Image: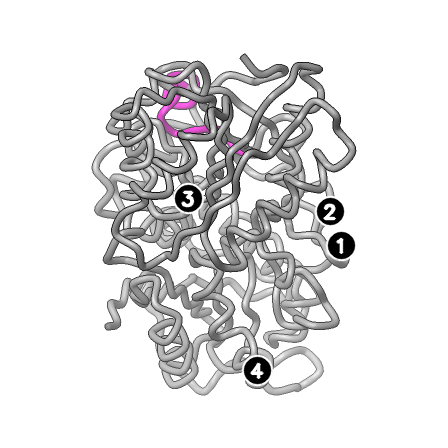
Amino acid sequence: MTSVAALALTGCSRDSGGGGENGESASPGITDTTITFGITSPLTGSTAGPGNCTVDGAKAYFGVKNDEGGIKFGDGKTRTVEIKAYDDGYDPQKALANFQQMVSDGVFAAGLGLGTPTNRAWREAAIDEKVPQVLVQTGDPLFSDREKSPEQLGLVPTYLDEGAAFGDLLVESGEDHKVAILYQNDDYGKGYVEGFKGAIEDASNITVTDELTYEATDTSVDAQITELASTGADVIFNAMSITPLTIAALQKAQALDWLPSWFLPSNTSSPGAILEPGGADAFPGVYSVAFSQSSSSPAFQESDEGKAFLEAIDTYTDQDGAPAFPHCVWSWIGAATLEQAFTNMKEPTRESFMNALFDISDFSAPFMLEGSTIDTTTDGKPAVSNVQVQKYNGKGYDVADAIG
C-alpha cells in the first residue's frame, strides 16, 4: 500500500532532533539537517494521473533545492526536505491507514495530496495527533475553517468558488441557457453545485433542466448522460473528478448527438489526458477554471522558468515529458509555499511552522496567473482563492469572457 519516495538522504543522519534557541524540544520529523513531509495520494487506480502529480511537483521542487544544498530555515539551520509518498488509491480507509503509518514513520507534517474523501478520512486523526495537514489539493472549504480544522489548510480554490465562476459566466452572458447538472455524490460534487446554484439563484436567463448524481466508484455514467441529453439542455455542468468517467461522458454525449457547452472542474480538464481522447473539439465550448499556467502550453515550455520546471520533473520523477495534469504545477506551487513557511519558522516545531504558514500574504508563487497570489492569512480561505474561467481552444485554454 505504501510506496516511499525519499529525497535528500545524502549526508542526513537521523539524530534525535534539533533544538531551538530557547532550548525547546523539536517536533517529530525534523532534525538539524532534515525535515520529513508526507503525502498520501492516489498513485494507482482511476485517479493515478493527477494523484502522482501531487507528489511529483514537490519531489521535483525539493530535489532541486536539496541538490543546491538545502533550505535555510528561520532558526538559522539549513535542512534538506525528505518527501515520503503513500498510495491510497483514492480509498478513504487507505488514506487513514497511510496517515497512521506516517505518524509511525515520524513525519513532521503532511499534505499536498489529492482528494476530498481521502483527505477528510484522516483530518480528525491529524487534529488529534497535532500533525499539520496542509496545502491539500481539495477545494473542500472545511480544510480552511480554522475553528473546525486547526491543523489544516487547503491549497486550491474551493469548489464553491469554481462553481460560482461558472455560474457567473452564464448569468453575465445575458442569453437564455438550459443547464443539465451531473455531479459526484459527495462533498466534492455538492460543493461545485452549491457554488453554481448560488451564482444563478436570481438569474432569469438560466434554467436547470435536470440534476443527476453518480458515485465515485461507478464505472459508467452512460445512463445519466442519456437522461440529461433528453432534456435538450444547451449546457452541462459536470462536477466530475474521475478521469475515465469524464472521457466516457464526453464520448457518450457525442454518440447521442447531444452537443452542449461543457463546464468541467479544474482537476478534470486536462487537454492531453481528457479533452483530446474525449473528442472535446466536437462541442461548441468546453470551459474550466485555472489559477496557474499550464505546463503543456508553448509559452510555458519556452520560458526559462518553464524549462527549469520540465528539467526538474524529468530528473526527479517518472513523468514522461510535460505533465498532462495541472496538479504537478500545483504541487510545485505548494512546495514553494512550504519553503516560505520553512524560511520563516523560528523554532523546529510544528507550532512554529503553522504560525509561519498562516502568515504568508501576497506571495507570487511560480507559475501563478496574473491576479492570483498565495494568501494564507484569511480564515475560511485556502491559500489560493482567485480563479479565471478559460475556454478550450483545441490544444490548451484561452481566457473566456463570454460563453459561446
Residue, disc 1? 377
Residue, disc 4? 26
- The answer to the question of whether label 1 and label 2 lie on touching residues, with beta carbons closer than 8 A, is yes
- The one nearer the camera, 374 or 45, is 45
Query: Total number of numbered labels?
Result: 4
Position of residue 120 measured from the top left corner of the image (x, y, whole percent)? 51, 69
Q: Tag on residue 327?
A: 3
**Res 271 quadrant in image:** top left
- Residue type indicated by callout 4: Ala
- Residue type indicated by callout 1: Thr
Q: Is residue 368 left or right of residue 117?
A: right
Local crowd size for mark 1, using a 10 Å CA cut-off: few (<14), some (14–19), many (≥20): some
Q: Nearer the viewer, mark 1 or mark 4?
A: 1
Residue lying at 45% horizontally and 56% vertically, measured from the top left = 70
Q: Nearer the viewer, mark 1 or mark 2?
A: 1
Q: Secondary structure at mark 2?
A: loop
**Res 103 quadrant in image:** bottom left
- Residue type indicated by callout 3: His
